[in-house]
C-alpha cells in the first residue's frame, strides 16, 4: 500500500473486514514486518512515539505509517505470498504456489484509514485463519482454537483445524483457490454468527 493515496478516515458502527498473512514460527505467528502477535487481537502503536490518535493520517511516523494493515482483496493477499525461495525451497519444494503460513480474515475497528489496496487500523481482531501446512490446508475459526494457535501453534496445529482439513488431493493450484474461497466465506458471515460459533 506504500505510495497509495490516502482516502478519508472511515467511521463505521460495524467492523471493516480485511485480509492478512502471518508467518508461522516455532514460538508463534508473525506479521509481514516481523511483529509477533501473541493473541488474535492487536492494537496499533506508533513506533516513533508520535502523539495523537493511531493510525496517523500523515506520514510523519515513518514508512510505512503506523497502524494494523490489511488488504481488501483475498486474491491479492494470496497472490502476494508466492513461495520464498530464500528459505523454503527445501522444506516446501512441492508447494510452488503458496507460502506456508496463516491467511486470515480480520475485523478492523477504531480509527480505520482506507487506501487503494487496503486499510490501516487502530485495532484488528482475527475472525478465522486458513492455515497452509506442508501437505494440507485447514481452517481455524473458533475463539479458543484461535487463541491457542497464536499463543503456541505447535505441535498440534493441524488438530486445531478440526474437521475442516484438505490433504491437497486437488494439488496446489486447487489449494490456492481453496484459501481464497475460505477467506471469502468467512468474510461474508455476519459477525454475530462468527462470534456465536466461537463460544
Image (cartoon, rainbow, N blue to C red):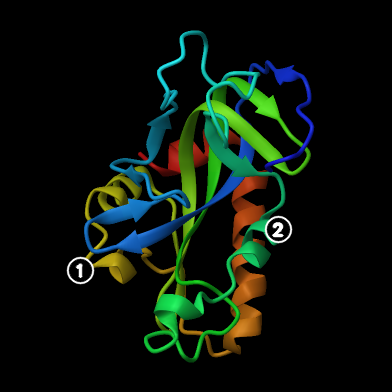
Say which residue appears at 63% left-offset and 74% top-offset. 176
Where is residue 105? Give x, y as percent.
Answer: 55, 47
Say which residue appears at 67% left-offset and 25% top-offset. 113
Where is residue 172? Give x, y as percent.
Answer: 59, 84
Evaluate whether residue 189 shows in this view.
Answer: no
Q: Assign a secondary structure to mark 1.
A: loop
Say which residue appears at 40% left-offset and 77% top-offset. 87
Can you tell which quarter of the image residue 35 is in? top left
Q: Reply above or below: 75 against 71.
A: below
Residue 155, disc: 1
Name the quadrant of the N terminus.
top right
Q: How many marks?
A: 2
Q: Nearer the viewer, mark 1 or mark 2?
A: 2
Left or right placement of residue 30 versus residue 62 in this view: left
Tell me the residue that label 2 is attached to: 76
Comparing 103 with 27, the one in front is 27
Evaluate whether residue 193 shows in this view.
Answer: yes
Comparing 143 with 112, the one in front is 112
Where is residue 31? Give x, y as percent.
Answer: 43, 49
Q: Reply above or below: 194 against 62.
A: below
Q: Earlier in the sequence, mark 1 or mark 2?
A: 2
Comparing 100 with 55, the one in front is 55
Q: CA distance from mark 1 to mark 2?
A: 30 Å
Looking at the image, the residue that sits furthest to the top is 52
CA neighbours of label 1 inside 10 A, class few (<14), some (14 to 19), many (20+): few
Residue 44, disc: none
Where is residue 161? Give x, y as percent.
Answer: 38, 64
Q: Assign a secondary structure to mark 2.
A: helix
CA neighbours of label 2 inside 10 A, class few (<14), some (14 to 19), many (20+): few
Amino acid at each position: 500500500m506504500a505510495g497509495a493515496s490516502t482516502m478519508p478516515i472511515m467511521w463505521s458502527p460495524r467492523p471493516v473486514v480485511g485480509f492478512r498473512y502471518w508467518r508461522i514460527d516455532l514460538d508463534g505467528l508473525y506479521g509481514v514486518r516481523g511483529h509477533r502477535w501473541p493473541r488474535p487481537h492487536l492494537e496499533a502503536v506508533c513506533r516513533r512515539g508520535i502523539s495523537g490518535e493511531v493510525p496517523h493520517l500523515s506520514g510523519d511516523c515513518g514508512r510505512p505509517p503506523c497502524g494494523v494493515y490489511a488488504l481488501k482483496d483475498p486474491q491479492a493477499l494470496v497472490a502476494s505470498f508466492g513461495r520464498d525461495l530464500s528459505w523454503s525451497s527445501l522444506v516446501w519444494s512441492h508447494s510452488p504456489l503458496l507460502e506456508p503460513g496463516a491467511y486470515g480474515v480480520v475485523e478492523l475497528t477504531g480509527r480505520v484509514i482506507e487506501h487503494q489496496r487496503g486499510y490501516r487500523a487502530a485495532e484488528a481482531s482475527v475472525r478465522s485463519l486458513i492455515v497452509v501446512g506442508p501437505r494440507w490446508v485447514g481452517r481455524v475459526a473458533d475463539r479458543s482454537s484461535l487463541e491457542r494457535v497464536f499463543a503456541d501453534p505447535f505441535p498440534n496445529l493441524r488438530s486445531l483445524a478440526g474437521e475442516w482439513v484438505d490433504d491437497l488431493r486437488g494439488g496446489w493450484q486447487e489449494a490456492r483457490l481453496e484459501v481464497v474461497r475460505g477467506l471469502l466465506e468467512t468474510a461474508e458471515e455476519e459477525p454475530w454468527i462468527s462470534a456465536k460459533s466461537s463460544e
